[in-house]
Amino acid sequence: MAIDDRSEAIGDRRSHLATYNDTEVSVPILAAVMPAPHQPIEIREFARPVLPSGGALLRTARSEVCGTDVHLWHGRLSGVPYPIIPGHVSAGTLESVHGQLNALDGSTLREGDRVVFFDVHRTCGQCRACTVHRTPTRCPSRRVYGITDPAGEGLLGGWAQYIYLEPGVGVARLPDSVGFDDYIGGGCGLLTAVHIIERASMREGESVVVQGTGAVGLSAIALARLAGASVIIAIGDPSPRLDLALQMGADVALSIGSTTAEERLQTVRERTYDEGADVVIEAAGSARAVEEGVTLVRDGGRYVIAGHYTDVGPSAINAHRHINRKHLEIRGCWGSEARHFVRAVELLEQHASAIPWRSIGARTYSLGQLDAALADAEAMTITKALVDPWA
Ligand SMILES: [Zn+2]
Ligand SMILES: [Zn+2]
């Protein structure tokens, strides 16, 4: 890549960034770059960064291809600084550390430690979103590895043999009992699900409907079960994902393709004293799902919308029948915070041996196979593609 172009792009962010050791004759680092929407993925060579104090280089063991990457590929997210190195949730081993690097629990991290990091960085802590409203996922300074970090600034995405962890990135030690494939099987969907359950104000004994059986919906099912749900009804497709939904803790898994909306409503009513569910979680990303979701939730219940990460157009809702008279709470859920990341790691440590997060990661792809991985993810032939940049 062109070093000169990069130094211009760095601008006033220079203090955050690693400089690049142009003189060191070393093996270049390979990364898969998404040059622009609809373009084939390119493998490019990157120089090994010279780390600033508090910075680290992570040798990537696993990254992932998630639904967001498919959206990035189709240009459906605004404000993405292409070209980018995708892969926002990743795991690996610390290759080198410059100076002191502490995990989020305060412990000192050293080279050779297995770690994971929170993909959201540069949340400012000073703007109105951060301080007044306490909604840091809406901070305008916030950046996300693999999504809003340009490839021109270096190894800031997981589809790469190494990832640069800039000073201030939240890092956690991966517990010995949690494999890289467990962590990435949960991945971003698990972090999102931790936030969803928090937004849903889940209480023991409540009934839950989860719309969508992708990575977010599957983790939401598992966490609703851990939170003490009485009954969990999953709605999704295709059938391997419905089987996985049952393994993750759903009591019932309904195929969206082979049941009618009336049949789904009837099933939910039969399991909820003819009331509808206490909590409905939207993790489908479909405008029609929202129209159905407001009918599946009980009067006075909570509806958490987390699947509309991109704009899929309007949903038709009758404000009188579906919100006002129903006394319904509709809550959005955007992104995740460091506490959701830390809790996700802790949940995996406690439960990865019993809950099959690992099974969400269906197949592992090399850097040269990522066009195929994106196509497979889009076609839903797999739930989630894992990336092994050393394969
Ligand atoms: Zn802020
Ligand atoms: Zn993701």
Image (cartoon, grey):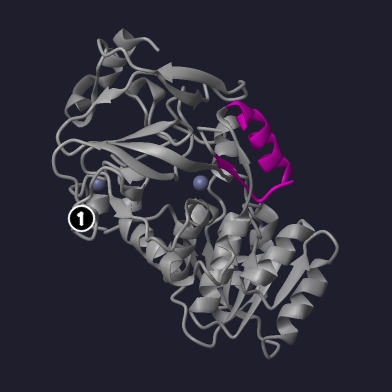
Residue 301, image x and y in percent? 54, 78
Residue 127, image x and y in percent? 21, 47
Q: Quadrant of the C terminus?
A: top right
> At x 70% / y 56%, what residue is drawn?
288
Q: As displayed, is residue 379 above or below residue 46? A: below
Residue assigned mark 1:
131
Q: Is residue 187 left or right of residue 243?
A: left
Q: Quadrant of the N terminus?
A: top left
User: Which residue is the extreme one toward the bottom?
Assistant: 273
Q: As displayed, is residue 305 above or below residue 248? A: above
- For residue 328, say whether it is visible: no
What is the quadrant of residue 268 in the picture?
A: bottom right
What is the quadrant of residue 207 in the picture?
A: bottom right
> At x 19% / y 24%, what residue is drawn?
14
Residue 27, image x and y in percent? 38, 18
Q: In the rendered structure, does residue 380 fall within the stretch colored magenta?
A: yes
User: Which residue is the extreme one toward the right?
Assistant: 258
Which amino acid, mark 1?
Thr
Q: As displayed, is residue 88 above or below residue 305? A: above
What is the quadrant of residue 292 in the picture?
A: bottom right
> At x 39% / y 60%, what residue is drawn?
176
- Circle 1: is it few (<14), some (14-19), or many (20+) Cα within 10 Å? few
Q: Is residue 140 left or right of residue 311?
A: left
Badge 1 element: helix
> At x 68% / y 91%, what residue is drawn?
273
Q: Is residue 193 left or right of residue 377?
A: left
Q: Is mark 1 within 8 Å of ligand 1?
A: yes
- Front-lying residue, 266 or 197: 197
Q: Provide the major secondary structure of the magenta segment.
A: helix
Q: Which portion, as a residue range, is magenta?
A: 368-387
Residue 369, image x and y in percent? 63, 30
